[in-house]
Amino acid sequence: MRFQTELVPATLIRRHKRFLADCTLADGREVVAHCANPGSMMGLAVPGTKVWLEPNDDPRKKLKFGWRLVEHENGHFTGVDTSVPNRALKAALKAGEVPGFEGYTTVRPEQKYGENSRIDFLLRGASLPDAYVEVKSVTLSRAPGLAEFPDSVTARGAKHLDALAEMAGTGHRAVMLYLVQRTDCDRFALAADIDPTYAARYAQASGAGVETLCLGTHISPTGVTVAGPMSVCI
């Protein structure tokens, strides 16, 4: 998935009101960027951090920049836009590039299922059980090489696990897919200390037959693409 317009570097001044970020561009101008991330963004919203913004000239948008990446001192990147994983995965699923989903030829995003829920992707293929795939963007890392989810309490995430468990109970494939939007991590775990309820519901869902898949990403200021499987330490 390529960004629609060329990203520009900036320095983060502060994140505020969850969805806004004040930034300084290379030419010294201060701008307000949209932050498409409802989480805590622990460790990513530190003032002075180098960030990458996507400019736009859409007259329908009040803010003319969107915060897309954090660039770390070691040259690695973290993608902070939580809408990116579904866009990147949609392309990879349609191209048959996601391991474990070979043979699924129909990819339907945002399908209603369960009780007042929408699944990120419903996959269908000849002679294969329907696959219900829920996607979570992972950006938290508190230990070298280890990505964790969630970065804040997520009642919505726990609800999604319950809905997946129901689908597994009816004979469908139900998959919890964690997409790690960091290039400095090679393994994944649940942040049970941050949200013990989510961890408990994950254990219940796993026991009910919900599969877990964790994938890495290739990230640069030009775009984000899905990489291979990542070790899951749960």
Image (cartoon, rainbow, N blue to C red):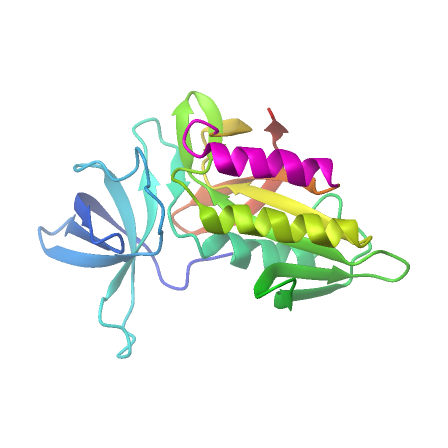
Residue 48 quadrant: top left
Tell me what residue is drawn at x 65 percent, y 37 percent: 204
Where's residue 203, x and y in %? 63, 33
Residue 144 position (above or below residue 132):
above
Q: Nearer the viewer, residue 207 or 24?
A: 207
Main SS of the magenta segment?
A: helix
Is residue 220 rendered to the left or right of residue 200? left
Task: Evaluate whether residue 230 shows in this view.
Answer: yes
Q: Which residues are magenta?
A: 192-208
Tell me what residue is drawn at x 37 percent, y 47 percent: 80
Is residue 157 rendered to the left or right of residue 6? right
Tell me what residue is drawn at x 73 percent, y 41 percent: 208
Magenta region includes residue 146: no
Magenta region includes residue 204: yes
Where's residue 30, x and y in %? 10, 54
Task: Evaluate whether residue 97 shows in this view.
Answer: no
Tell me what residue is drawn at x 62 percent, y 68 percent: 112
Residue 78 position (above or below residue 61):
above
Spot the residue most to the bottom: 59
Quadrant position of the C terminus in the picture: top right
